[in-house]
Amino acid sequence: MACWLKRQVRAVELFAGAGGAALGLHAAGIEHLRCIEWDKDAAATLAAAGFPTVCGDVRDLSLYAGLDPDLIWSSFPCQCWSSASPDRLGPKDTERNGWPWTMDAIDAMSPRWFVAENVTGLTQHRGECAGGCVGPELCPRAYLDRVILAQLRERFPSVACRVLNSSSYGVPQHRRRLIIVAGKHAIDWPAPTHGKPTGQGDLFGRSLLPWVTIGQALGLDGGMVVQSGVCYSDPGTHGKESSAKLPSPTLPGSSGMYVGESLAGSRPHRLDQPSPTVSAVGECKGSGEGGNPQKMQRASDALFLATGRRRLTVHECAALQDFPPDHPWQGNQQSQYRQVGNAVPPTLARVVAEAVLVAASEPA
């Protein structure tokens, strides 16, 4: 065992947000040396949760002076690659492409291990690539392969990436994210622990627990239905008379399922399944098990309760993101919704961190 593993593994977290990844790393037994976050409300949430927080710019290399982390975790900004962003510009978006800043931090601190989390849009070729890849200046997949992974391979013996779905690990939400791991050894990627109730077994015959559902997370009847996919002009009244005054009709049949208002463009989601992706993006298209990143939705209007009478509260959205009920969200309501939608589910971060710790304990 490496001598550094005889003590608690220490981490620096970049673009730390409101603490989703921090909670997961902490649950895995990792100590934070520093969490760096630019947004003052998210940084306040992190600090209130007890993490060593600096509200600052990751481009400021002085923030890394004297730090010797074993691990760097970076949830670098993804808007320039997200398929939910209509103006994604890739590396040309110098204000929202956080990868170069992440590389500067790696070079400044020389960690033994590195983990990044990002949107699955980074794994996709652009439409213009039909006749041949247009290259990393325009194509997300080319940027991943030729820039991100290539730069990591210059610094680490082992580099790999995989798309993981949070619902496969007990998070009540289908949230697919690209995870990149670089270090001394290849890791064994975390095996799914949860799956469809009707087929609870993986390719190797291992028994899986049933998905954690919307209903379980929110304490609602599992036979009910929630709706997504409808945008409203006002988040309180949904742009018309408050739907709190409207009835909730029962669907035909003996299932006892309920829906809210039948609105054009809406999409039903059963409460006995995981939630679609909860996001801070301003689009309102549902994202189910397939996790199409083009169908992201806002945390505030991502789902509304089965009665159709109100949007989910911040704490209900946070429950779908796997946060503990007492997480100390700071800032105004709009800021809190944004923090929730941008967060990493803690359990997803935990299972990745645990896989890294196992690999790190292997002999050199």
Image (tube, rainbow, N blue to C red):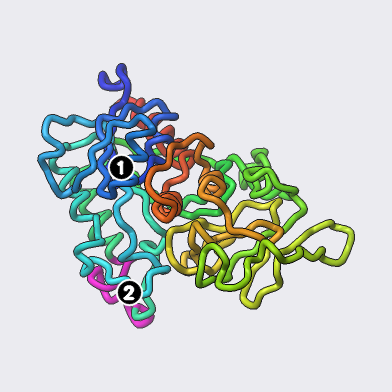
Give the residue type at disc 1. Ala
Give x and y (percent) for residue 151.
20, 53
Q: Residue at x 34, y 30 (%)?
A: 360
Disc 1 to disc 2, C-alpha distance: 27 Å
Q: Residue at x 40, y 58 (%)?
A: 119
Q: Nearer the viewer, residue 228 or 277?
A: 228
Tell me the crowding category of disc 2: few under 14, some 14 to 19, or many 20 or more residues within 10 angstroms, Cα based: few
Q: Nearer the viewer, residue 12 or 343?
A: 343
Q: Find disc 1 in the rendering and name its residue.
A: 43
Q: Find disc 2 in the rendering and name its residue.
A: 87
Give x and y (percent) for residue 78.
33, 59
User: What is the secondary structure assignment of the residue under circle 2?
Assistant: loop
Give x and y (percent) for residue 330.
39, 43
Q: Nearer the viewer, residue 232 or 10?
A: 232
Q: Residue at x 75, y 55 (%)?
A: 224
Give the residue type at disc 2. Asp
> Which of marks 2 and 1 precedes in the sequence?
1
